[in-house]
Amino acid sequence: MLGKGLDAQTAFEILSIDIADITIGENIGARLRADQAESDMRVARAKAEERRAMAVAEEQENQAKVRLAEAEVPHAIAEAFKSGNLGIMDYQKIQNIKADTNMRDSISKDDKKDG
């Protein structure tokens, strides 16, 4: 107290200060900041979950579109046979390319498992 100069410019002199009881209250500002940070974190987590769910839904939608397109391929091949735009040798080349692609895919998957 004396170091802070609380007795300066007064008609009194501080001889002693008796402190019988000190009660420290809760720091409301710190509590409010902590609550706000927790609330912000919950909002961020909810938004992240929403983005994740949207990404999963979009991926499933894209997979469905691919499957629908793949289902049209046999119909298109049959139509090409009927119209004469596709011959047996052309079809055989397509089947060989598919088999070669499947083989390469299986080899690459085995390499990924080993690595």
Image (tube, grey):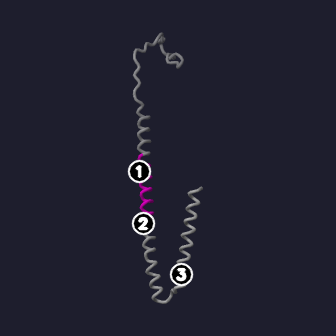
* Mark 1 vs 2: CB contact within 8 A: no
Q: Which amino acid type is shown beneath numbered disc 3?
A: Gln
Q: Report the front residue among 38 and 73.
A: 73
Asked whether, in this view, residue 28 is left or right of residue 115, the answer is left
Q: Report the front residue among 101 and 5.
A: 101
Q: How far apart are marks 3 and 1 (CA)?
A: 53 Å
Query: In the image, is residue 103 above or below residue 94?
Result: above
Q: Is label 3 or label 2 in front?
A: 3
Query: In the image, is residue 53 above or below residue 94?
Result: above
Q: Mark 3 points at which residue?
A: 92
Asked whether, in this view, residue 29 is left or right of residue 92, the answer is left
What secondary structure is marked by label 2? helix
Q: Residue at x 43, y 75 (%)?
A: 71
Query: In the image, is residue 95 above or below residue 63?
Result: below
Q: Which amino acid type is shown beneath numbered disc 1?
A: Ala
User: The magenta stretch spans which residues?
Assistant: 42-59
Q: Which residue is drawn at 54% across and 17% down?
A: 3
Q: Name the residue under label 2.
A: 61
Q: In which quarter of the image is the C terminus?
A: bottom right
Which of the two labelled residues, at mark 3 and mark 2, occupies the earlier sequence position? 2
Q: Report the front residue among 13 and 4.
A: 4
* Mark 3 vs 2: CB contact within 8 A: no
Percent x, y for residue 37? Answer: 44, 42
